[in-house]
Amino acid sequence: MADAPKPAPTHADAIRDFRLQDVAALLDGDLETGLNACIECCDRHVASGGTALDWESADGRRASYTFAQMKELSARFANLLTAQGIKPGDVVAGLLPRTPELLVTILGTWRAGAVYQPLFTAFGPKAIEHRLKTSGAKLVVTDTHNRPKLDEVEKAPKVALVTRPGEPAPRLDDLDFHAELARQSATFEPVLRKGSDLFLMMSTSGTTGLPKGVPVPLKALLAFIIYMRDAVDLRPEDKFWNIADPGWAYGLYYAVTGPLLLGHATTFYDGPFTAAGTYDVIKRHAITNLAGAPTAYRLLIAAGPEMASSVKGQLRVVSSAGEPLNPEVIRWFDAHLNAPIHDHYGQTELGMVVNNHHRLKHEVHPGSAGFAMPGYRVAVLNEDGEELPPNVPGVLAVALARSPLLWFTGYWRQDTPSMAGGYYRTGDTVELEEDGRISFVGRADDVITSSGYRIGPFDVESALIEHPAVIEAAVIGKPDPERTELVKAFVILRAGVEPSEALAEELRQYVKHRLSAHAYPREIEFMAELPKTPSGKLQRFMLRNQEANKIKDGAA
């Protein structure tokens, strides 16, 4: 007779019983004597005979790769890197869609003891150039579609090009990805590193400067394990799909690293997001555990209950991250998909830290971000850095000394003023509830959340100002029922340049090309002047208030 399943632990029990050494024991390696992310996410699971990746292309091609196959392919890529003189600690960037080659690049980079840097495929040359300059990447792996962007990147690194049948051969100065892999040895002993050594180089959005580098050390693997186990509740019998793109933190942390750490297959769908396509993938791959952003879920709702009926009851749990989850989404998923959807909160700098946990038992309230994940202590601070009592708005912070899973120590070669006085301040305004829950109030900075992406207005403003017609620009997030916010730009033109819709469209396309497909301003308003403080600091909040009042008055 089989043993009865153990009852789910309570959140209070998990917090009380948390011990860092217990989590560290879940790894094959040791934080002090050496570990390797490719061993943790691949090699140690080979004996299980399990699948590492289920992949499907937009045109319906499908393939699965076992951990054994990924071990061999990652070894070939690691040998390619060493042949190019890339050493442990060097950075390798990936500018690839969700394909098997992307996973080979990530795992092979880690196998060689190098640091992987994601580049979102919608990025334009300006966004790519800044990130490569920040990291000092020695190699970029990309495909034929994205290769031309690197021609506009100053001092671009060496390129390894992934080509498909029928596409032109790589240029003479580029490496042929598949040909190089084929000629490399299928064995490569993983390079052991310490827990404080880096394995990822991320970037985050900011309001007063260009995106900042976020170095991620190997000890972050411990936090990723706890999130996948306690919040996502990933079980061996699940079929898992995180629809977030691995070019961003939530996708790279929890669509790639997280499931593979647990020896669980991940799913890559290399196609555009549509409601019909998403439901089809869920059905074809028998997905039971789904993760993504509220924007995607709202689009599923917009498609109607009839489309959802094909997978009703199939999803065991659904996780949401990137922006606060709307209560109506929770109600709709319950009614039409028979699936519990829980809100999770985190940042590129932290990973996920406040969650409505699927595995841990606690009260779940719509509109609440949930409770601190085991291994973290969060607090709400006032402007003086003092902890606030319940029901008083303040800045969400993580207590450094009492958060053993916290891995972020500061931005890459930059000051980190948000980390001071014993806390890391997220910049997001929240309230602490009486029972310890965190309720999201709003952002204390100007970062725009649109379709699940966090967009720094400074990036967009910088791109606009590069256009010869523009002398000054201010960018805000305008409330939008579909995207949460849309990017709106207020532009001052140079003398002699006349505003027009044609010019506005030219500016949109200019930013779209220079920056990315998701960060360009969908609305542009030409202005004679912008609101500023007496010292000349831009007051974006006044523009946000202006737009909010227009919506309130029904004028927009």
Image (spheres, grey):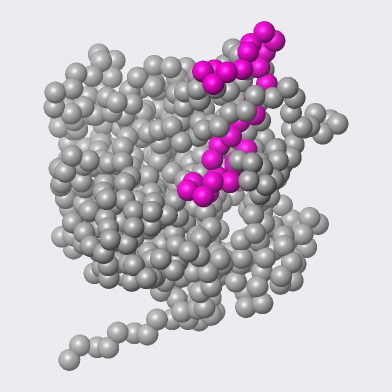
Q: Is residue 261 left or right of residue 390?
A: left
The answer to whether residue 198 shows anywhere in this view is no
Q: Residue at x 62, y 38 (%)?
A: 476
Residue 244: % across, % down: 38, 49
Q: Front-most of 450 and 479?
A: 479
Instruction: Residue 441: say if magenta.
Output: no
From this view, report whether residue 492 is shown above or below residue 399: above
Q: Front-most of 24 and 145?
A: 145
Instruction: Residue 486: say if magenta.
Output: yes
The quadrant the N terminus occupies is: bottom left
* Furthest residue toward bottom: 1
* Furthest residue toward top: 496
The answer to whether residue 502 shows anywhere in this view is yes
Q: What range of the chain is rendered magenta?
A: 476-503
Q: Front-most of 231 and 445?
A: 445
Q: Residue at x 18, y 60 (%)?
A: 50
From this view, report whether residue 41 is shown above or below residue 309: above
Residue 356: % across, % down: 49, 69
Q: Is residue 354 left or right of residue 266?
A: right
Q: Residue at x 52, y 78 (%)?
A: 363
* Residue 467 picture quarter: top right
Q: Front-most of 83 and 497?
A: 497
Q: Is residue 420 left or right of residue 449?
A: right
Residue 519: % across, % down: 50, 34
Residue 129: % across, % down: 48, 25
Q: Is residue 215 left or right of residue 312?
A: right
* Residue 47 picture quarter: bottom left
